[in-house]
Image (cartoon, helix red, strand yellow):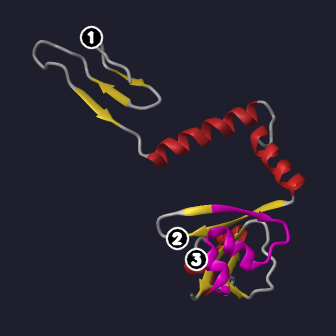
Amino acid sequence: MKIITQVAQAGTVESSDILIILAPATPQSGIQIELSTPTPKQYGQQIRSLIQKTLTEYGIEEPSLSRMIKLSYDLLGLQSFFTVGPDECRAWTVRRGALAPEAAGEIHSDLQKGFIRAEVISYDDLMTLGGMVEAKAKGRLRLEGKEYIVQDGDILNIRFNI
């Protein structure tokens, strides 16, 4: 964080962790400083915008790290699926061709033992429809049994009973 001791004129100073808005210091008004920290959403948008601008400038379609991760998953025969809740979204890794109970076991062994069914929607469908409520309304959220082969990018909600 930057510390400013003298202010000659009005302006804005930005750093990576704080935005400081400055007003001129006069004997009549004193020094006025307003501190504002960007929200995580604003900070994330700024970073995504900067990354996209840089990639575009250099004609790069995808960051190297993303490509390396995809290639590594392919070579190892792995894929990801997601679980989504009101306070958390999490990615899990399973082998390609894993059945739904095996994927449930990656989350917790009790989920595999007591597996009943999985509510499933693909990531692309969820993003297109805008959310789980809309997906249910449009009939895109489906129930799959023990023989379901989990697909890369599936979003699963495991139903179980122990």
Q: Quadrant of residue 8?
A: top left
Q: Are marks 1 and 2 in contact (CB under 8 Å)?
A: no
Q: CA distance from mark 1 to mark 2?
A: 48 Å
Q: Considering only order in the chain, which callout, 2 or 1, is on the residue closer to the N terminus?
A: 1
Mark 2 vs mark 3, CA separation in Å? 10 Å
Q: Are marks 2 and 3 in contact (CB under 8 Å)?
A: no
Q: Which range of residues does the magenta coloring cover?
A: 91-117
Dot 1: element:
loop
> Going 20% across and 24% down the picture, which residue do you hit?
32
Residue 26 horizontal side relative to residue 112, left or right: left
Residue 94 location (% of width, % of height): 76, 65
What residue does disc 3 label? 132
Q: Earlier in the sequence, mark 3 or mark 1?
A: 1
* Mark 2 element type: loop
| Mark 2 or mark 3, whichever is nearer to me | 2
- Looking at the picture, how far across and down is residue 23, in whole percent? 26, 22
Seen from the viewer's position, the closer of residues 98 and 52 is 98
**Residue 6: image tag:** 1
Q: Residue at x 78, y 66 (%)?
A: 152
